[in-house]
Image (cartoon, rainbow, N blue to C red):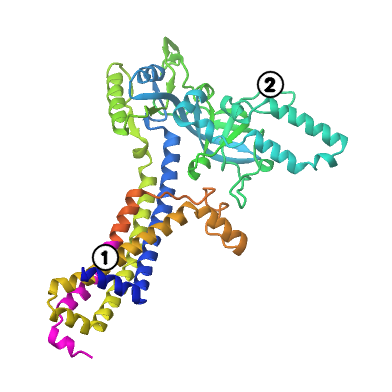
Amino acid sequence: MYKLLLIFKYLRRKLAPLFAALAVTLCTAMVIIVISVMGGFLQLMRESAQRLTGQVTIGSDLSGFPHHQELVDELDQLPEVAAATAMVRAYGLINMFNRVHTIEVVGVDPKSFDDVTNYRDTLYWTNQHLLDDLERTLPPIDKMTQRQRAMYESSMQQYQRVDLRDLGMSFTPLHQPLNQPPLPGIVLGIEVSPYNRRDEQGKYHLSVSPLNTELTLTVLPLTLRGTVMEPAVRRMVVANEFKSGLYEIDANRVYVPFDLLQQMLRMDAAEEADPDTGQPTGRTLPSRASEIMLRGQDMVSLDQLNRAVTAKVEQFVGARSGMPPLWVQTWQQRHATLLGAVEKEKMLLTFLFAIISVVAVAMIGVIFYMIVLEKTRDIGVLRAIGASRGGIMSIFLGYGLVIGCLGAGLGTALAAAIVYHINEIQDFLTVYFNFTMWDPSVYYFDKVPSRLDPLETTLIAVMAVLSSLAGSLIPAYTAGRVDPVESIRYE
């Protein structure tokens, strides 16, 4: 009982231990905040990567593989698979605003692609953007001229009849060029256009977007042997833009209708020609696709889905002659380089801040050693009346444990408060002090990403308590070695 009484007596009457607890609090909070922000960034990257590629991808080279619809139908029958979609992938050029860009062209069926990747949710422009842009360009209704009011009412009626995301899903442009045949739609990555810029809130403005802009798409078809054929060129109109969350994708990828890209790349069903004479052979070559993406059922793990799909693909390829080899990858394997780099950065930052936190251990050691020197006479009295060396050591170890628990608890609470309100703190600093920690016009995410992981937080708190115990170990050992006779005469 005397041990607890002395521990709490020293804690109440000494200011120095409170500074030690404050050091533990700040170090604990600092490490948790850093690992939470990096963890939130990594989580957003993971979600974006998985959204782009589904959970499992089956693919071949750019020449593609046949019987893709049969494979999709068989995959849909697997109990582990929730949805599957075929895609055509190529590289090409777009000429927009008289500027030529190298881009990745992906042909998709919007309905099945949305079932796998939630494609509709990535489409950026909505009717609200149209209305906001209209309100910015026109004066208030009560100050409009008759002509402006008529234009406003006409635009409102038009925007109420259509949905920009529906147009993006169907690759249907909002407006077509006058006196020309209808052109197919194309959906661009939000950063493909050189004129799209994020403002201070990380938002894009419709007034400078390429929506409804006509452009020229050029792709290079390949033969089954991989030789380049004559380029295919098609005029198209921008129906919408998408934002996946990965800048490299949003700056280099465009989506077009699956059948259209198949035709441009000459991957649709066609009569076979003799490679030497060029004469038809009378045999029809099946259409080809580049990839198949899949999403698993909710209760199925990624490994289970991968094994089931791999077994089905091996069976499918083995049962058909002339099928090229197909590879099967999970979204983690496909984006391993990108995600691995972010994970290593998270580990490195956490390690560096953990090293900085060693200052708390040193501070506790110094403070406790000073307390031992100050309380040498008290320790001698305790030893003289029968307290053991272990009992004296346990007083200071318990002292360190209490400070560690107090600091870890307060540090965890402080970190949680900051992490859960980090964007509100960011807004407050920006408004009142003109200080911006996270500039949405520079960083690709609109908000500061953060994710408080219970396991990581608990581990950091436990390490903080153990660090406090480690800091009190040497002073406790020194206190236990005090000679009672010499300590009573200590000045």
- Most frequent secondary structure within the magenta stretch: helix
Front residue of 403/97: it is 403
Taking the view exactly as shown, the residue that stands out farthest to the right is 146
Q: Earlier in the sequence, mark 1 or mark 2?
A: 2
Answer few, some or many: residues within 10 Å of disc 2's Cα (few below 14, many 20 plus, some between 14 and 19).
Answer: few
In what quadrant of the picture does the N terminus appear?
bottom left
Q: Residue at x 43, y 24 (%)?
A: 86
Q: In this rendering, is residue 279 above or below 227?
A: above
Measure the alpha-carbon separation of dots 1 and 2: 79 Å
Answer few, some or many: residues within 10 Å of disc 1's Cα (few below 14, many 20 plus, some between 14 and 19).
Answer: many
* Residues shaded magenta: 465-491
Disc on res. 181: 2
Q: In this rendering, is residue 320 above or below 444?
A: above
Q: Secondary structure at mark 2?
A: loop
Q: Amino acid at mark 1?
A: Leu
Q: Quadrant of residue 75?
A: top left
Q: Position of residue 361 (x, y in %)?
A: 29, 70
Q: Amino acid at mark 2?
A: Pro
- Asked whether residue 30 is drawn in magenta, I would say no
Front residue of 309/255: it is 309
Front residue of 251/22: it is 22
Front residue of 53/305: it is 305
- Asked whether residue 489 is drawn in magenta, I would say yes
Residue holding disc 1:
401
Q: Position of residue 453 (x, y in %)?
A: 37, 49
Observer able to see residue 352: no
246 to the left or right of 157: left
Q: Position of residue 66 (x, y in %)?
A: 39, 20
